[in-house]
Image: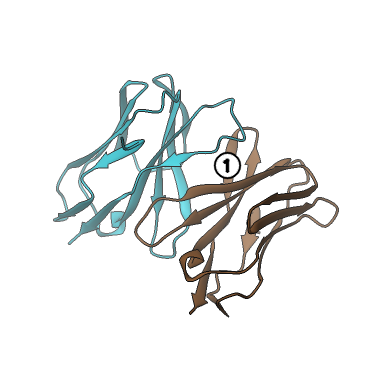
Amino acid sequence: DTAVSQTPKYLVTQMGNDKSIKCEQNLGHDTMYWYKQDSKKFLKIMFSYNNKELIINETVPNRFSPKSPDKAHLNLHINSLELGDSAVYFCASSQLTDRVGGYTFGSGTRLTVV
Amino acid sequence: QKEVEQDPGPLSVPEGAIVSLNCTYSNSAFQYFMWYRQYSRKGPELLMYTYSSGNKEDGRFTAQVDKSSKYISLFIRDSQPSDSATYLCVADSNYQLIWGAGTKLIIKP
């Protein structure tokens, strides 16, 4: 009955590889997000999709490409991984117009690039 | 200057103490404010929200917003070791969340 689930939980890969992280939510929310949390624990928004439409696209290298096949899924593909991409990536979902409901986060994917 | 500022801590207090966590923000247009709690190796979870100025209480937790000084506070009464986590204050800016860096709280048994 996990609300927001992302896979894998851990990912260790070499520089230059391409990898994907998947996210699914069963809350019926219309908006999903990708966040990056660096070693200093600062959460930074990367992308947001509302009903499969990209609504937030922060300044992120174009090696990062999100894809939302439907409003319950948001995947993140990363090409040509670099050491600086090592971080925890969180998926989240919300109902866009429900300001007080907040975001529901997944448990994170800990990416280590070696 | 970051739009939402928090002291990263860590803040270490003995069990049972009253904890005060604080944030300042720069944009007077912010009206919705939230506190999220993040345990180690977990995603953040919504703890409380407040709208505009005033207090909101939920069990041992009280959130307070003072818009005149652009100051946000979270008070935890009768703190427990299970309250040990990072607390993030967040402002809602036109449906986009502006996150503070979080304050790490440690409650010593």
- Tell me: residue B43, above or below residue A93: below
Q: Which quadrant of the figure has residue A86? A: bottom left
Q: Is residue B17 visible?
A: yes
Q: Is residue B101 visible?
A: no
Q: Which chain is cyan?
A: A
At 36% from the left and 35% from the top, the residue drawn is: A3
**Residue A93 point in image, percent of width and height:** 43, 34
Residue highlighted by disc 1: B97
Q: How is the image coloured?
A: by chain
Q: Nearer the viewer, residue B66 or A54?
A: B66
Name the tint of chain B in the rendering.
brown
**Residue B32 point in image, percent of width and height:** 69, 41
* Badge 1 element: strand
At 64% from the left and 40% from the top, the residue drawn is: B92
Q: Nearer the viewer, residue A53 or B67?
A: B67
Quadrant for the N terminus of chain B, please.
bottom right
**Residue B11 point in image, percent of width and height:** 56, 75
**Residue A57 point in image, percent of width and height:** 45, 34
Crowdedness of circle 1 by 10 Å Cα count: few (<14), some, many (20+)? some
- Tell me: residue A66, above or below residue B48: above
